[in-house]
Image (tube, rainbow, N blue to C red):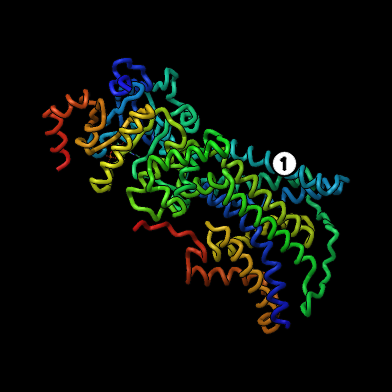
């Protein structure tokens, strides 16, 4: 437990991003010179204002950049010591990276349970282990069990975020890329979701790379953070250091309001 | 009595339109492509089947070999056409299927000939009485076949992992990618399944009017069916086919004599046009769920 609570004690590197550059449509340079690492068992925050490049960085890691007509044009990404810069998304999911997209993206016409099941298919599980996976998600998100027969498009925003996270957990990831889970949700729900993220990290050792604009909430739960500004990392440090950094508070608040 | 018989005859014939339309809907849902090549694939599969059958291959074996060919064709199309064009505009993809349709037609006819092949399924196209009603035996067999096929597809899409994955891709392609669904794999499956609905429709149509080039033109008949039923709903494709079949038959019987017949040639388009004014998304066009 203590090793997980303090991931830097052993510091096994799960993900390393080295100086990457991402270009959309062969024309728009969205991210350049971004480097970061995610130690095993850590929650890492990726902070920044609108358009800073948080989502682009996550998409580069999960391989979903290509679905948006973008590419990692230089630099490299390693996952569990293996080069993964140009690995297709479904292979990365098999290897243990899963991406919860910004804006939740549940399958609106599928029921809550079908949404969850769909996340399990990548492991080609037996009927029983798929069922066991479902039960595990329902213990984390008891609310989803009540709604399991409802079309996901008809559930509330908070429930959709839970569906999106639950669906991702069904792939049995070692690292979850979580893009703005707080977006458009009431503070109480945001708290509930972040609480579950922390618990998943502590009890199951799942690592998180977490993009957020909501700095206080993100740093309350993260161990370490990076700050992005117009496609570059401008600051990094432990959650404590960043919380005390007045420049960050000023810059961030200045951008926001 | 005449009305009822005309209606039933039309509905039964309409099931074949539905079959053709379902092939379109499947591909449209999974990849947003209006697959113009569906007609050529239908022609290709019917032609291959009839050629094998004429060469003395038993019925079931010929079907299985044709299905195998359709699966290979689907894999080839996915690898050579769809994959390189990933993320291109729907128009580009449509043009690609247009080109594909000529390529498939050309190859099919080049290899297997352009003559009309008779196809005898051993079902007499003579009317039989069901109670007091006179119904075409062939239409009845065709309709039962269509119902079986649709039931199998419904089970496939509702219950199986492939079905859920396919509906997931149709709902949100990016999210499907994010949880490890292999899009290329899904496309191959969908094109193969659409090919199989084409094969069934092709055999049934071919048995009625001979297997020949004009079979590929059923694409044009599927268009009004899709406009009426909606591009995104299998239920809509079925309903659209039935509506077109029934109304076409009724129009021929009741308005036909007054204007000298030939109504079945154009009535479906007229109906589709009317629908475009009333309900552009089609009867069952899928509405996006607006969250409350
Ligand atoms: N699909 C796209 N096509 C072209 N440019 C894009 C695309 N998506 C993002 N960009 C550009 O890349 C840059 C970074 O965007 P990104 O979405 O990564 O920012 P973000 O930090 O996630 O912002 P937000 O907080 O608003 O989600 C922006 O300048 C944006 O204009
Ligand atoms: Mg973003």
Q: In the rendering, at what x and y percent does residue A2 appear?
A: 30, 20
Q: Could you tell me residue A13's position as x and y percent?
A: 36, 18
Res B135 quadrant in image? bottom right
Q: Residue at x 68, y 55 (%)?
A: B149
Asked whether mark 1 and ligand 1 are closer than 8 Å, the reply comes as no
Residue at coordinates 64% horizontally, 51% vertically from top-left?
B38
Q: Secondary structure at mark 1?
A: helix
Image location (x, y in percent) of residue B178: 44, 37
Q: Is residue A249 left or right of residue A47?
A: left
Is A219 left, or right, of B120 in this rendering? Answer: left
Q: Looking at this view, is A161 or B61 the one in front?
A: A161
Tell me if I can see residue B84 in this picture: no
Mark 1 lies on residue: B69
Front-most of residues B44 and A105 = A105
**Furthest-top residue in this view:** A10
Drawn side of residue B224 relative to residue A9, left or right: right
| Farthest residue, direction right | B56
At 58% from the left edge and 58% from the top edge, which residue is drawn? Answer: B234
* Residue A146 in view here: yes
- Residue B281, compared with residue B43, is above or below; it is below
Chain identity of mark 1: B
Residue B63: percent from the left, percent from the top?
A: 77, 47
Question: Viewed as shown, does residue A36 lie left or right of B90?
Answer: left
Q: Residue at x 80, y 68 (%)?
A: B137
């Amino acid at each position: 437990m203590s090793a997980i609570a303090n991931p830097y004690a052993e510091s096994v590197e799960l993900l390393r991003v080295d100086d990457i550059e991402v270009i959309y449509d062969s024309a728009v340079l969205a991210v350049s010179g971004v480097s970061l690492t995610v130690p095993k068992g850590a929650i890492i925050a990726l902070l920044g204002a609108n358009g800073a490049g948080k989502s682009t960085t996550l998409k580069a890691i999960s391989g979903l950049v290509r679905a948006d007509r973008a590419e990692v044009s230089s630099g490299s990404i390693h996952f569990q010591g293996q080069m993964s810069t140009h690995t297709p998304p479904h292979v990365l999911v098999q290897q243990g990276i899963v991406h919860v997209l910004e804006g939740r993206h549940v399958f609106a016409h599928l029921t809550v349970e079908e949404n969850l099941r769909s996340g399990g298919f990548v492991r080609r599980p037996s009927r029983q282990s798929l069922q066991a996976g479902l039960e595990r998600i329902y213990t984390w998100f008891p609310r989803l069990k009540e709604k399991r027969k409802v079309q996901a498009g008809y559930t509330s925003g908070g429930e959709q975020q839970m569906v999106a996270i639950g669906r991702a957990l069904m792939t049995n990831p070692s690292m979850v890329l979580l893009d703005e889970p707080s977006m458009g949700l009431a503070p109480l729900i945001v708290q509930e979701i972040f609480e579950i993220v922390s618990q998943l990290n502590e009890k199951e050792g799942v690592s998180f790379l977490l993009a957020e604009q909501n700095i206080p909430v993100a740093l309350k739960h993260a161990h370490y953070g990076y700050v992005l500004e117009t496609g570059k990392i401008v600051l990094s440090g432990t959650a404590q250091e960043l919380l005390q950094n007045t420049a960050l508070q000023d810059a961030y608040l200045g951008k926001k309001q | 009595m005449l009305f009822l018989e005309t209606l039933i005859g039309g509905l039964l014939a309409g099931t074949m339109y539905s079959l053709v339309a379902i092939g379109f809907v499947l591909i449209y849902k999974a990849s947003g492509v209006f697959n113009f090549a569906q007609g050529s694939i239908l022609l290709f599969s019917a032609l291959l089947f009839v050629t094998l059958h004429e060469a003395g291959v038993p019925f079931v074996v010929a079907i299985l070999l044709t299905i195998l060919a359709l699966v290979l064709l689907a894999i080839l199309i996915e690898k050579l056409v769809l994959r390189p064009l990933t993320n291109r505009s729907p128009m580009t993809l449509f043009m690609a299927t247009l080109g594909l349709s000529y390529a498939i037609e050309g190859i099919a006819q080049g290899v297997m000939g352009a003559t009309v092949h008779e196809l005898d399924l051993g079902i007499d196209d003579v009317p039989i009485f069901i109670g007091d009603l006179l119904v075409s035996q062939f239409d009845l067999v065709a309709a039962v076949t269509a119902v079986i096929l649709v039931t199998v597809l419904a089970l496939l899409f509702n219950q199986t992992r492939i079905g859920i994955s396919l509906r997931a891709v149709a709902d949100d392609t990016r999210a499907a990618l994010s949880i490890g669904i292999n899009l290329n794999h899904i496309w191959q499956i969908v094109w193969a399944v659409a090919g199989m609905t084409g094969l069934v429709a092709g055999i049934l149509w071919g048995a009625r009017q001979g297997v020949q080039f004009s079979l590929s033109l059923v694409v044009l008949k599927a268009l009004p069916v899709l406009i009426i039923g909606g591009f995104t709903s299998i239920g809509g494709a079925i309903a659209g086919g039935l509506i077109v079949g029934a109304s076409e038959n009724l129009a021929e019987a009741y308005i036909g004599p007054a204007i000298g017949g030939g109504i079945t040639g154009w009535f479906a388009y007229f109906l589709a046009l009317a629908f475009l004014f009333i309900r552009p998304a089609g009867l069952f066009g899928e509405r996006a769920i607006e969250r409350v």
